[in-house]
Amino acid sequence: MKEVILIKNGELALKGLNRRTFEDVMIKNMRRRLADLGEFTFTPAQSTIKVEGPDGADLDEAVERVSRVFGIAGFSRALKLEKNFDLVLENAGRYLEQQLLEAETFKVVAKRSDKKFPFDSPQICLALGERLLDEFPHLTVDVHNPEITVMVEVRDHDIFVHANQLKGAGGMPVGTAGRAALMVSGGIDSPVAGWMMAKRGVELTAIHFASPPYTSERAEQKVHDLLGKVARYAGRIELSVVPFTEIQEQIRDKCPEDLFTIIMRRLMVLCAERIAKHSGCGALITGESLGQVASQTLGAIACTDAAATMPMFRPLIGMDKDEIIAISRKIDTFEISILPFEDCCTVFTPRHPRTRPKIADVEAAEAKLDIESLVERAVAETRKIYIS
Ligand code: ATP
Ligand code: MG
C-alpha cells in the first residue's frame, strides 16, 4: 500500500503522433524538478502517468512541484493497492477520511482497464459505496452532483483509489516549442510574460540590462529572485547580464532627449538578439502591453520591432495591468517586483518622450552613435548566471 501521483496529460492528448515526444519531455521536466527528493519513477499508461517515489519521499513537496509543471491538465494523489478488491474496501475510507468527513455527498466511479478483474465496474461501485456509507453514516450518495467522486481505477498491475482531481498548470511541456530570450527587468510585467511563454512550451533564456553605478547590485538581485520564481515553472534559466551604462550615456550625450527611450530600446533589442542567437533562441519576449507607457504605443513598438530581425513575442500586449498583476500574484513574483530599486529604464528618463516617433528621425539620431562597436562591447562583457 503506497501513495503515488497520477498525472493527466493536458493538450498532449490532442497531439496525436507527437504525443510520445511531448510526454517524454514532460517526464524529463518532472524528473529534473523532483531529482533532489529521491529517485522517482514515471510510468505512462493510457492518458495517465504514474509518478512513484522511494519510501519516505516527501510527497507533499513532490505534489507542490508537479503542480507547476506545464503540460499537466490535472493530477491526483492516489492510493496504490495490490489487485485485491478486499484491500480497496478496507482502505479506501481510511485513505480518503479527511475529504469524506468534510463532504455530505459522494459517488463512486470505477474504471476497469483490466477486463479480467473478477469484479466489474457496477459491482465495484456498489460494494465500495455501501462500505463507505457504513463507515461514514453522515454521507449520502448523489450520482449527479456529488461533492466527492471516489475513483477506483483497476489497471494492469495495480488498483488506484483517489478523489477529486486537482488542476494542473496546463499549457505545453517546456522545451516542446523551442527556445526564446526573455528581456527581463525588475518590473511586474516581464516575469509574467516569461511565465506565459513557458506555459506555451517555450524554454526560456533571460537577458537583463544593468547600468552600474546608476543601478545597484540589489536591482540585479531582484532580477535573480524574480527568475527564481519563474524557474519553478519554466525550469533552469540561463541569465545574461549585459552592461548597459556606456550605451545609455552615449545616447544621453549624443541623441535628442525625446528619443532617448526609443533608441535605448532599439539598442537593447540589438544586443539581445545577438545573445539570443548565440543561445539558440528563435525569438525575443518582452513584457510590453499596448499603451501602458510612452514606449509602448503602436508607433514606438513599430520602431522597436524595426530593430529586430527575430520575432518579438509580447504576450501581455492586450492585457490590463490588473490582469497582469493577478498572474504575478499567482506565480509569486508581485511582492518582489514592487521592491523599489532603480532600473536602467528609469535612469535618464526623458521629460517628454516622443509617443509617435518616426523611424527616419530615430535612424538619423542613431547615426551619431557607433552602434556596432557599442553593441559588440556590451555583448562581449556580458556575464552569465544560472538560475534554478
Ligand atoms: P516591466 O514591468 O517588465 O519592467 P514596464 O511596464 O516597466 O515593464 P518598460 O520599462 O517600458 O515597461 O519595459 C518594457 C519591456 O522591456 C519590459 O517588459 C522588458 O521586457 C524590457 N525591459 C525593460 N527594461 C529592461 C532591462 N533592464 N533589461 C531587460 N529588459 C528590459
Ligand atoms: Mg520596467
Image (cartoon, rainbow, N blue to C red):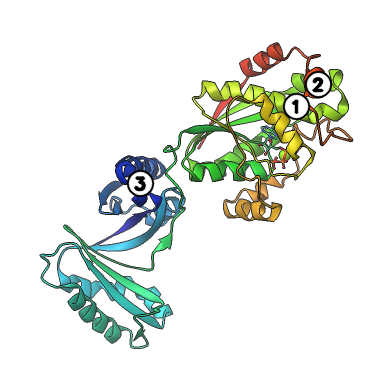
Q: Farthest residue toward the right? A: 351
Q: Residue 357's x, y, as percent?
A: 81, 31
Neighbour tally class for label 3: few under 14, some 14-19, many 20 plus, Cα within 10 Å: few
Which residue is tagged 2?
Answer: 251
Q: Verify CB contact (< 8 Å) between mark 1 and mark 2.
A: yes
Q: Which label belongs to residue 264?
A: 1
Identify the residue at image location x=38%, y=68%.
164
Q: Residue 322's x, y, as percent?
A: 69, 55
Quadrant position of ligand 1: top right
Q: Residue 146's x, y, as percent?
A: 39, 78
Distance (Cα) linking label 3 and label 1: 42 Å
Q: Upstream in the sequence, badge 2 or badge 3?
A: 3
Which residue is tagged 3?
Answer: 15
- 5 vs 337, left or right, is left
Q: Which amino acid lies under the numbered mark 1 shown in the image of this protein?
A: Met
Q: Upstream in the sequence, badge 3 or badge 1?
A: 3
- 176 vs 79, left or right, is right
- 53 vs 118, left or right, is right
Residue nearer the viewer, 226 or 374: 374
Label 2 residue near ligand 1, CB within 8 Å: no
Residue nearer the viewer, 147 or 302: 302
Q: Which amino acid lies under the numbered mark 3 shown in the image of this protein?
A: Lys
Badge 3 marks a residue whose secondary structure is helix
Identify the residue at image location x=70%, y=30%.
304
Q: Verify CB contact (< 8 Å) between mark 3 and mark 1.
A: no
Q: Which label belongs to residue 103?
A: none
Task: Classify 309 as above or below 227.
Answer: above
Q: Residue 155's x, y, as percent?
A: 20, 60
Residue nearer the viewer, 180 or 35: 180
Task: Classify 8 as above or below 87.
Answer: above
